[in-house]
Amino acid sequence: MEELFPLITFLKDYSLSTVIIAVLVAVLKIVFDKYLGKKLPKIVLTLIPFAFAVTLAVAVDMAFYCKAFNLRIDAIYSGLLSASIGVAFCSIINRIKNGQSVSVKTIDLVIEGILEGYVKTDMKALAVSTIVEILSETTNLVNDNFNLDADGKLVKDIVKVIKEYSLDGFDDNELIAVSHLIVQAFNSIEKENT
């Protein structure tokens, strides 16, 4: 139970709607991975939690905050944040099942969850730490326009890391999409922390 205390402290910083959507995302991800894991392409299973969370966050924003049909960028960030937290929940559950420690940074848990099935299990920790290092070295990553660096170097660097530790059978476009997802998840978490 002591390992879950940092999680409870972490969740105090977020709104109720963000946490509820994150829990729903975690449940959806677990159900989809269990029952549709072999039937759907890996990229679809990776993107569904994020699409679901953004859709719910935008709907909640329109219904309860704006009270109008108005798409706000903050609602999209909220959805990305909720999805990231939901993926982190799934990573925590997997770590508890495997007897691993859950006292790691949230972004590590999110990247670990996104990379699930893309990188070799024994190399996942190394891939995650390398990607976190790349993201941490990048300056001015968080912005209001979802823009990445001009030449896409950040995404290319993350794709190289994933390829280095990846399982076979993934094309470049799929790995680019996963890299963009990692960057956007990092952006949403960093934006919330600033």
Image (cartoon, rainbow, N blue to C red):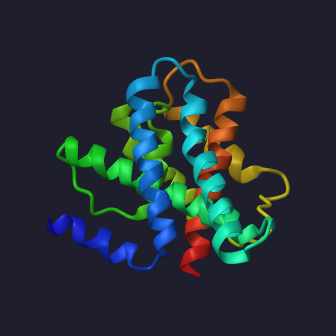
> Which quadrant would the N terminus be assigned to in this image?
bottom left
What residue lies at 80% left-to-right and 65% top-to-bottom? 69
**Relative height, residue 140 to residue 99 (above, below):** below
- 97 and 79: which is toward the camera: 79
Where is residue 19 shown, x and y percent of the image?
A: 45, 66
**Relative height, residue 129 to residue 164 (above, below):** below
> Which quadrant would the C terminus be assigned to in this image?
bottom right
Where is residue 160 shown, x and y percent of the image?
A: 62, 39
Residue 81 horizontal side relative to residue 113, left or right = right
**Relative height, residue 36 to residue 28 (above, below):** above
Q: Among all residues in the image, which is located at the extreme left?
A: 1
> To which quarter of the image does residue 150 belong?
bottom right
Residue 142 visible in the current orientation: no
- 116 and 35: which is toward the camera: 35
Residue 25 horizontal side relative to residue 176, left or right = left
What residue lies at 80% left-to-right and 61% top-to-bottom? 147
Residue 27 visible in the current orientation: yes
What residue lies at 67% left-to-right and 76% top-to-bottom? 65
Where is residue 70 shown, x and y percent of the image?
A: 81, 67
What residue lies at 62% left-to-right and 65% top-to-bottom? 60
